[in-house]
């Protein structure tokens, strides 16, 4: 912290381990009052610390790191669930009485998620021809062939 001069409040110029600990509490949602109790500081000291530009940068860095870790965890969870999702879709599509329209919509949804969905106007190629070809392939292929194609598209290992 800087020195008192001309009646000005000292400012933080560098973060010390204690400041980084406080930053972790701020990112976790602790209030200034809770932080002052935990660290034995006055509310005014806490306010000066949490409003310092270098402290705010540290909090943003921590938040971004936490966000990146959460996103990576979610992606890993989804990747581990994907094979079972394909199995469930396969079971449901083969269940007696499922209307063809639902089977077709499910197939199109899977293709869309794999990057083979509707072409945007002006993106090259006629949209209706692409959809007609895909629709014909789906109608002509067996469920096993479609399942194999979907697994190939999403690059999931078969069990």
Image (tube, helix red, strand yellow):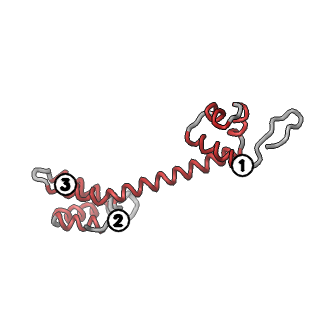
Front one among 69 and 130: 69
Q: Residue at x 15, y 53 (%)?
A: 100
Kind of element beneath mark 1: loop
Q: Are marks 1 and 3 in contact (CB under 8 Å)?
A: no
Q: Are marks 2 and 3 in contact (CB under 8 Å)?
A: no
Asked if residue 131 lies left or right of residue 92, the reply is right
Q: CA distance from mark 1 to mark 3?
A: 60 Å
> Considering only order in the chain, which callout, 3 or 1, is on the residue closer to the N terminus?
1
Q: Residues within 10 Å of mark 1 (few under 14, many from 20)?
A: few
- Residue under numbered circle 2: 125
Kind of element beneath mark 2: loop
Kind of element beneath mark 3: helix
Front one among 121 and 102: 102
Q: CA distance from mark 1 to mark 2?
A: 59 Å
| Mark number, residue 113 | none
Instruction: Please indicate, yes or no, whether residue 53 appears anywhere in the rendered image.
Output: yes
- Residue under numbered circle 1: 16
Q: Residues within 10 Å of mark 3 (few under 14, many from 20)?
A: some
Residue 11: image location, x then y, percent: 78, 41
Query: Looking at the image, is 44 positioned above or below residue 137?
Result: above
Using the rendered view, name the quadrant where residue 39 is placed. Answer: top right
Q: Quarter of the image for the N terminus: give it.
A: top right
Extreme residue in the right direction: 6
Using the rendered view, name the quadrant where residue 34 is placed. Answer: top right
Q: CA distance from mark 2 to mark 3?
A: 26 Å
Residue 138: image location, x then y, percent: 20, 63
Query: Looking at the image, is 49 positioned above or below residue 130?
Result: above
Front one among 106 and 2: 2
> Considering only order in the chain, which callout, 3 or 2, is on the residue closer to the N terminus?
3
Q: Residue at x 28, y 63 (%)?
A: 130
- Residue under numbered circle 3: 103
């Amino acid at each position: 912290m800087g020195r008192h001069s001309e009646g000005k409040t000292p400012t933080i110029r560098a973060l010390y381990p204690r400041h980084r600990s406080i930053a972790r509490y701020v990112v976790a949602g602790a209030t200034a009052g809770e932080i002052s109790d935990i660290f034995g500081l006055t509310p005014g000291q806490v306010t000066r610390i949490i409003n310092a530009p270098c402290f705010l940068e540290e909090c943003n860095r921590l938040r971004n790191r936490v966000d990146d870790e959460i996103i990576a965890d979610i992606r890993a969870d989804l990747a581990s669930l994907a094979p079972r999702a394909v199995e469930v879709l396969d079971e449901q599509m083969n269940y007696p009485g499922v209307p063809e329209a639902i089977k077709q919509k499910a197939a199109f949804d899977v293709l869309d998620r794999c990057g083979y969905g509707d072409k945007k106007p002006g993106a090259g190629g006629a949209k209706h021809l692409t959809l007609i070809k895909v629709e014909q392939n789906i109608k002509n292929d067996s469920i096993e062939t479609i399942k194999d194609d979907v697994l190939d598209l999403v690059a999931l290992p078969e069990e």
